[in-house]
């Protein structure tokens, strides 16, 4: 199956657009995606000038206890596509204010301190965290099975053209 995919995409090229100097990072997390150890998967693609500078798909090193935590770990590696993780980045009181269980942050203390550097970058305005709806999430191709049309859409959005 992999060889068939490689043969079918051998004519694809990366395309960059002159003048587009902004970088955009798309990330996705597949919470508890590994059925053997329930580690989550992170996928991200770093876009610049309309084409990818790099991309990655890998198993997370720690077990995430929620989809929000898996996304928060993913954002520490590249970016974010989960509104709840984005809100956690923006405001530590988010979940209490939205009538979630009051001890939410007690349950998220196990998130390793190294992941909180994203919050610092956000506060310094060095990183903008924005929700990206599933239909526009380029990194989906790196974390889950997709329909053929969604797969083609993702690779085209990554700047891969035939």
Image (cartoon, rainbow, N blue to C red):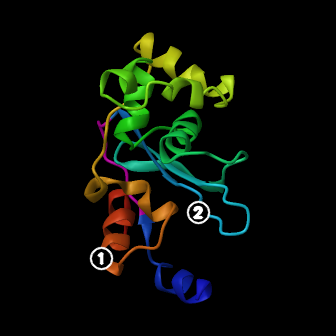
Query: Is disc 2 placed on a helix, strand or loop?
Result: loop
Q: Nearer the viewer, residue 20 or 84?
A: 84
Residue extent of the magenta highlight: 14-20
Q: Nearer the viewer, residue 16 or 127?
A: 127
Which image quadrant is residue 116 in?
top right
Q: Residue at x 31, y 39 (%)?
A: 131
Pointer 1 with pointer 2, Cβ within 8 A? no
Q: Is residue 19 magenta?
A: yes
Q: Is residue 128 visible?
A: no
Please state the horizontal and vertical placement of residue 84, each as a whole percent of the image.
38, 36
On screen, residue 124 above or below 45: above
Q: Circle 2 sits on which residue?
A: 33
Which image quadrant is residue 136 in?
bottom left
Q: Circle 1 sits on which residue?
A: 149
Q: Quadrant of the N terminus?
A: bottom right
Q: Is residue 12 visible?
A: yes
Q: Nearer the viewer, residue 117 or 65?
A: 65
Q: Residue at x 30, y 37 (%)?
A: 20
On screen, residue 56 above or below 33: above
Few, some or many C-alpha atoms within 10 Å of disc 1 (few <14, some 14-19, many ≥20)?
few
Please state the horizontal and vertical placement of residue 110, each as a whole percent of the image.
67, 30
């Amino acid at each position: 199956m992999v060889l068939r995919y490689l043969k079918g995409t051998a004519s694809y090229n990366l395309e960059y657009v002159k003048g587009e100097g902004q970088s955009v990072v798309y990330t996705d997390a597949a919470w508890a995606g590994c059925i053997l150890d329930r580690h989550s998967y992170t996928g991200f693609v770093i876009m610049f000038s309309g084409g990818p500078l790099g991309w990655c798909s890998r198993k997370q090193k720690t077990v995430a206890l929620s989809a929000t935590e898996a996304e928060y770990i993913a954002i520490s590696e590249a970016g974010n596509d989960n509104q709840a993780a984005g809100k956690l980045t923006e405001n530590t009181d988010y979940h209490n204010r939205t009538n979630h269980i009051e001890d939410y942050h007690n349950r998220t203390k196990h998130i390793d301190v190294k992941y909180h550097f994203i919050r610092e970058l956000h506060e310094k305005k060095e990183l903008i965290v924005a929700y990206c709806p599933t239909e526009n999430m380029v990194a989906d191709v790196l974390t889950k099975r997709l329909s053929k049309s969604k797969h083609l859409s993702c690779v085209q959005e990554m700047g891969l053209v035939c």
